[in-house]
Image (cartoon, rainbow, N blue to C red):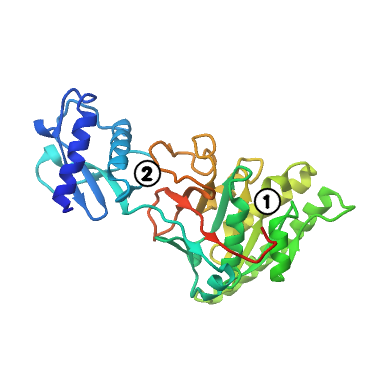
Amino acid sequence: MTNSQLALYILQSLNMALGSQMQGETSYTNSFDVKVETEGFYFIPRLPAGYIIDDDLYQKIFLIANATLYPRYTLLKQSSAYFVPLNTDDIHIQRALFFPWKLGISKRLVISDLEKFATSQTGTRIPIMENLMVDYNKVTSIAIAGNSGSGKSYGLTYFLTILKPISDLILIDPKFDTPSRWANVNNVKVIHPKMNRSKSDFVSEINESLSQSLTLIHQRQSILFDNPEHKFTHLTIVIDEVLAISEGVNKAIKEAFFSLLAQIALLGRATKVHLLLVSQRFDYNSIPVSVREQLNVLIQVGNINSKTIQFLYPDLNPEGIVIPIGKGTGLIQVIDNEHPYQVLPLLLPTYYTTKGIL
């Protein structure tokens, strides 16, 4: 299908669905037009118009076009109307609503041997889906959120295995569960609760480890001051179920935990120190707001609705996004200079790993 044919197809869909809502104004009455480009399509209204061009109209067009174009294209959801100027002297059509897309739909990676797959990867790029990779050099912190049974532990095991060849790991597992078993198989040190030990004592041990990481950041900053091009080994602090750490502990210890976490999130990017946080939700009880603002790989798995995504994607209305059915599915957003700031449907990789970890 050529671009002109695709534009006519989109126009026909919009005319049929929008005509009654826009007082009969259609492309047949020269009220608007559609232009298709490689990165997406433009909805070009002819002004003055008998309809209001606002966020509500943008979202209506998104709902119509996303279903119309599926599965050839996936429209990238915007939090508000995306206006762009057009290169023309005609004042009536000097602006458009832009709807960016990506070719095809999200496809799940299927990996027969996860350990072998991880060691075969070169560089610092992490495969997420068939058509999505993330450069770890551009990652500040990663968050994985989702309800119980949504596939968080499965996703975390994937990231741990992929990160092990490219990053040192500090693993904190308050539930003494899947991450601890993975660490035992892979000879990685893990901080977990021990018998006959208080919760405050456990969190104090975590704080000591975070304090050492913060000291390392300061040391690396001194090196960068003299040599800005110095290359550091990545260090990733992995915390499973953050909410389980911050609840039910002494207030002073909790405040120290939050303070250390915030400083690492704010200062770690240039020194290649990262956070990988997992939690059922990321409200103010689980992590400080300043930490949440530094996250640039946001993953929500499981049930997707306006309530479940309110902490990771506060400005997003998920209506119209086609979420695949199955375990380990949800949404992902990568915020860097390589990826657009849109939210994509996610399918976590399916893989096979050492027996007894999951």
Query: What residue do we see at 22% from left, 36% from top?
Result: 13
In what element is the residue under mark 1?
helix
User: In the displayed structure, does residue 20 sit left or right of residue 306?
Assistant: left
The residue lying toward the viewer, choosing from 219 and 257, is 257
| Rendering coords of residue 275 (x, y %) | 60, 58
User: Quick one: label 2, few (<14), some, or many (20+) residues within 10 Å?
Assistant: many
Quick check: can you spot residue 44? no
Counting from the top left corner in percent of width and height, residue 271 is at 57, 67
Residue topped by disc 1:
259
How far across and down, in percent of the image, does residue 293 sit?
Answer: 53, 48
Residue 116 image-quadrant placement? bottom right
Residue at (50, 40) in percent of width and height: 304
Please identify the quadrant where the C terminus is shown: bottom right
Residue type marked 2:
Lys
Could you tell me which secondary element the residue under label 2 belongs to?
A: loop
CA separation in Å, label 2 and label 1? 34 Å
For the question of whether residue 201 can be seen, the reply is: yes
Of callouts 2 and 1, the N-terminal one:
2
Q: Which residue is mark 2?
A: 77
Is 194 on the left or on the right of 24, as rendered?
Answer: right
What amino acid type should be assigned to the residue bearing mark 1? Ser
